[in-house]
Amino acid sequence: MNIPEENKKEWEKYRTAEFNDVADILLLLGFSADTEQTHTQGERYLMSGRKLVLTGHREHDGKKVIIKISSDPRGIKELEHEHLCRETIKKIDFAYKDILLPEEILFAKTGKFTVVVSAFIEEPVPFLLHSREEQFFLTLRAFEMLEGVHATASSHTKIIRSLWSSWGAAEYLRSFGEFSENIRKAVPRDTALHGAMAEAQKFLLAGSGTIERYSGFLTHGDFVPHNLRIVGHDVYLLDHTSLLFGNKYESAARFLNYLCVYHPELERWISEYIRKNRGEDEYLSLRLMRAYKMGFLLQFYTGSLAQTEGDLHRLAWERISFWKSVLSAILNDEFVPVETVLKYKNKRDSLRSEEEVRRQKKLHQI
Amino acid sequence: MKAVIAAPVFPPEVGNVSVYVKRFAKELCKASFGDVVVLAYANTFEEIDGVKIHCIKKSDPLLIRLFLYTVKLFRLSRGADVIYVYNTFASGLPAVVVGGLRGIPVILRFSEDEVSQRASAPRKNNFFTIRLLSFLQKRILKRARAISADGDFLAEVLFLSYEVPKEKIRIDRNPAPKPETLPFPPEFFPHRILFASTAENEARKEELEELENSLRKKIPDAGIFPLDEANISRAEKWHLLRGAGVILFFSCDVGYSLYACALSSGIPAVIFSSKEQAEKTLTDILENPGTRREAIANGNSILKEEYSWEAYVRNFTDFILHLS
């Protein structure tokens, strides 16, 4: 058996074994998992951390919940971190707006398992089904919620330091250097990609003053619609392990990189809004962060080449090529042409497994 | 002339005070005031052409940064005509100390009551801390040459809670913030009335329902919608303001910052003291284009005279000349 197949089988074995083991434990804790679990399928095995994210309900009242469970040391660490994030967020007294997170119902260690159960936030209309204008305003509302937490004073640092280090220009540059190095190792012969990464590194270095200026803000490293829940005027954030203190525009950068595939018009609207209302320096900060996040994506997909085969392997190459063109567009302060996006999406959809298509649909709630 | 602006914060730090400090320095410079120097607690700062900005690191412990701020302010205020300080203990205390030592008049900008905010904060300061802060606040206010209050309510607070003589208090409303540019035009609802309030008020709710019912007898699609500024983004606020037929305020709870935004949105923004008065004027504005135009023109003139940076800077400059 080759390595990619082995990895996938290993994840499936882990998933089945863990799922069988946890059913009784969950019942003892007063919860049960749903029979169908889309989130653990498809390309999930390529993502970080051995933990199961399950949908389920509370036995005594049928309340819908999200159950995260792991017996793996790395997975346990992630769950503990998430629990602490939630606790620390509550203690932050320098936020201009409340940070809304789903309520944690249970955090327990039982036998070899660590379990976190949190409330499932029902949203009447998922983000992507709102009108474009509403999506624009909801996004800005979420950005302003995060931007309202700016750790500058020593008393602020005291609250957050046990959990988060605050990322400034030096940390972003070092991290980007690591992305470049990992890419170089994964695809040693792709000189065009190395060239694009080197150009991006120069861009980050030249803009390090701007990166530093807008650092110290609460930010969400994986700020995408499926990590948001909209209830009336409230925007809830999911995936607390992605919360960190860093550049004000890291969340926006991740979001705009997502939008350039799923919603190019909204990508333009938000970019234009930031440029016209917050000034050139903040807009530059956004572009710098977008380039940084592209580095992360390119590292992720070049790293996945060794773990994939067949269609998924071809898809990884398509993704590398696409994100490389988006990176070039960002460096030139342009938007990637709509035709390029459409071509990529068609190719991507033809190469995705049915299981992954189902997982994506569930993830995006469409 | 030379002015030193002593501030507790400066952008990129978020919040109204931070935004206003930067804008004030920029506008003074634009009006050729002379030397404009800013001192703030900040780890990094956004630059302004023509303004010298100095910072004391916020990451240092409180007493150290207070000491460093005082020393720096003493140096920077050499030859200054005025120290304009945004009130907080961290900037107010050093400003009155330095002003006293140098014999420079200190104008204190009072845009929020820090003591009462701390007392009502979720994580309350203890009773003795509040007493101490209240005592210090009185001393700071006493030593300032003049207090510039952002509105009548704060002027009352100064007079009643801190015993500041009325003749020492000036009312200078914060100028309207820069209107935001959105990537799409607002959807305009000519008969939509936006109701802006600083507090939820059950009695007012009933009054508004009555008002809406009376208006609908003449204008069937008239509707009153609350504008809940706390729960929307800045962009959405501008979008809603620009799409309304009228923006309605009641005189007992006008949020002047929102009123200034309403004025600069180019939509009639009107303050009423009673439901009856509101009903008559609203009907007029909604039905009669001439009255509407007049209300907009009136709003523009209030904006220019009371809520513009030109007026704010002019009043400031005149006052400095008067002091000297």
Image (spheres, coloured by chain):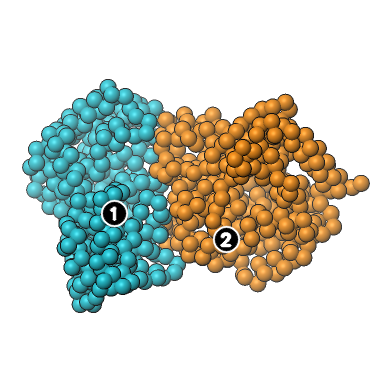
> Foreground: A266 or B212?
B212
Colour in which chain B is shown? cyan
Q: Which residue is mark 1?
A: B205
The answer to whether the residue labelled 1 contacts the one labelled 2, judged by CB atoms less than 8 Å apart, is no
Toward the bottom, the furthest residue is: B289
> Foreground: A279 or B160?
B160
Q: Is residue A13 in view from this perspective?
A: yes
Kind of element beneath mark 1 = helix
Q: Which residue is mark 2?
A: A128
Residue name at image x 40 percent, y 51 percent? B231
Q: Is residue B176 in view from this perspective?
A: no
> How many marks are shown on the rendered structure?
2
Residue type, numbered disc 2: Leu
Question: Which chain is home to disc 1?
Answer: B
Kindly indicate which chain is depicted in orange in the rendered structure. A
Image coordinates for residue A212, horizontal then vertical, percent: 49, 44
Apparent side of residue A216 relative to residue B153 in the rendered image (left or right): right
Apparent side of residue B184 relative to residue A253 in the rendered image (left or right): left
Residue type, numbered disc 1: Lys
C-alpha span from label 1 to label 2: 34 Å
Give the label, 1 or 2, closer to the camera.
Answer: 1
